[in-house]
Each structure stands twice: as structure tokens, then as C-alpha cells.
Amino acid sequence: MTQRVAVVTGASSGIGLETARALAAQGFRVVGIGRDAARCAAAQAELGTGVEMLRGDLSLLAEADRLADAVADMAGRVDVLVNNAGGMAREQVMTVEGFEANYAANFLGPFVLTARLLPLMRAAAADAPPGSVRIVNTASDGSEMIPGIDLGDLQNLRNWSPGAAYCSGKLANVLHARALAARLAGDGIVAHSVHPGTVGSNFFAHTPGSVQAAYADAPKLSPAQGADTVIWLASAQEPGRSSGGYWYERAPRQPHPLVGDADFVEAFWQAAEALAGRAGA
């Protein structure tokens, strides 16, 4: 049999590292992506030959393009894409491409990477059982906590805060999976999003002090526990029978009401494509 290929972003630590480890143990050839060179090297040493690490910063859309080209050079197919990279910034930073860095890292970069990898996923789906080729977006219950999304200001530039940037990016991950489900149904590819729970990882090291204080005493899952539903969505049989879901602890979870509005999901997709198309302009 042709070896299945999984691409896992944010694979140098936390949930992504555990996901890469588990999928490699299942026999996948895993291509891990991480931003920090030292953590990537440490992950490569820890995970061994079943995982190949690439370094790249998904807050830059040019980097998403470069990473997609690198994956294409390494493998002629992608069976699983786990868009796991993300985080919460302390302050607003604009990238050299003119995007708000936190929103770009949480959503725009993964949005572009997914689009660029779809030909490799369609190639995998052509000779794989329907539903076995998967896209999994790591979201958050933060996606449920904001009133909505301004389609004319996806990055919240007119009213930016760390929480708004993070929560809107995570809601975008859920909307992205829902929109992909409809677009990819004819290809036999499924897409899901997941709230992994509150995980004790280096996520909190980069958040504002107020967030660190609020969650200092909160119970936290281990990275392996947080990765459980991500891994299940990527590889178990049951999630391949549906698409576009939002999951928590291997069970469907009610998403933000906007996710159930098909017209809004389509309008969001069009706004995201228009925003991503500004890269390099």
C-alpha cells in the first residue's frame, strides 16, 4: 500500500507534537511544521525518522506558499492536514505583508496553506476510501465567545484587542472547516474543527498577563489529552462519515450560531479569499 502522508502544523510542541507522534505511530509519513528552529530540531530528535520537520512562520502568506511547495516536493499526496498552529498575542503587530500577525497566524496562513495543499489531497482521495482524507482545524471555545465577525474588518483593525484577535481567528477556523465541507464533498474529503480543551502547554507563555492570571489555577489537560480528539478526527473511522462538524471530547459541540448560517459561511469565505489575495499587493 502507498504510505499515507499527514501534514501537522504547530508540530514542534504541545498538541501538534503529540498529534505528529500518534500519526507516525499509526504508520503515516508525517511532515511537521513549526516556527521556532530550536523547538523544531528538538521535536525532530524526539520523534525520530517517522516525522520530517519543516520550519516556517504561517503569519506570512508567502511562507504558507513556500511550505506548500516544500510538501509537494517531498510527497505526491497529502491524506491528512492538521491546521494546529496558533496562539494569542500580547500586542498588535503588523507583518511585512500588511496583515495583523495574530489573525494571520491563526487563520490566514492556514487558509492559504490548505488551499495550496488541496491538489495533493485530491490526489490522495482519488485512490483512498471516501472520508479517509481529512482536514482538521484546531479551534477553541474562544470561537463561541464573541458576538460575531465584521466581514468588512476580519482582522478587527478598528477595534483590536488580544482576545478579539484570538477569538475571531478561532471562529474563522470553525467557519473554514464548515465551508470546506461543502466545497470538498464531491472529492470525498472531509473537514472538521475541534475545541481541544484548556491545555497546559507553552500557549499561555505568550498570552497577556491578564489571561495568564485568569487561567493560572484552572484545571488543564496534558498535551496528549488535548490532542486526543484531534488525532481521533484525523484517523478514526467515525469522523469520516460526516463533514463540517465542530467537536469536543470526541463528540459534536454546538458551534457559534454563525456557523449554522449557510449564507454567512459563504460570505465569510469570499471575504477571506479577498483578504488573502492582498498578500504581496
Image (cartoon, helix red, strand yellow):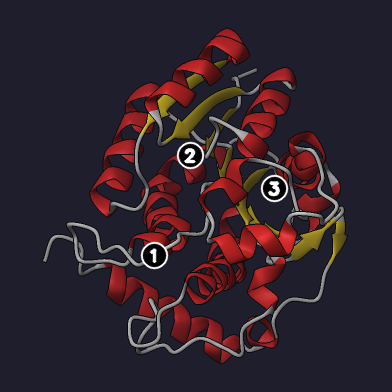
Q: Would you identify the image quadrant in which residue 37 lies?
A: top left
Which residue sits at x=88%, y=60%? 251
Contact? badges 3 and 1 (CB < 8 Å): no
Which residue sits at x=61%, y=15%? 47
Q: CA distance from mark 2 to mark 3?
A: 13 Å
Contact? badges 1 and 2 (CB < 8 Å): no
Q: Is residue 56 visible?
A: yes
Residue 201, horizontal then vertical, whole percent = 66, 41
Q: Which residue is mark 1?
A: 91
99 lies left or right of 53: left
For badge 3, the amino acid type reads Pro
Give the SS element for disc 1: loop
Q: Which residue is mark 2?
A: 123
260 lies left or right of 10: right
Give the SS element for disc 2: helix
For badge 1, the amino acid type reads Glu
Residue 280, horizontal then vertical, whole percent = 14, 60
Dot 3 or dot 1, earlier in sequence = 1
Residue 198 to residue 80: above or below: below
For badge 2, the amino acid type reads Ala
Q: Which quadrant is home to the N terminus?
A: top right
Q: Which residue is mark 3?
A: 130
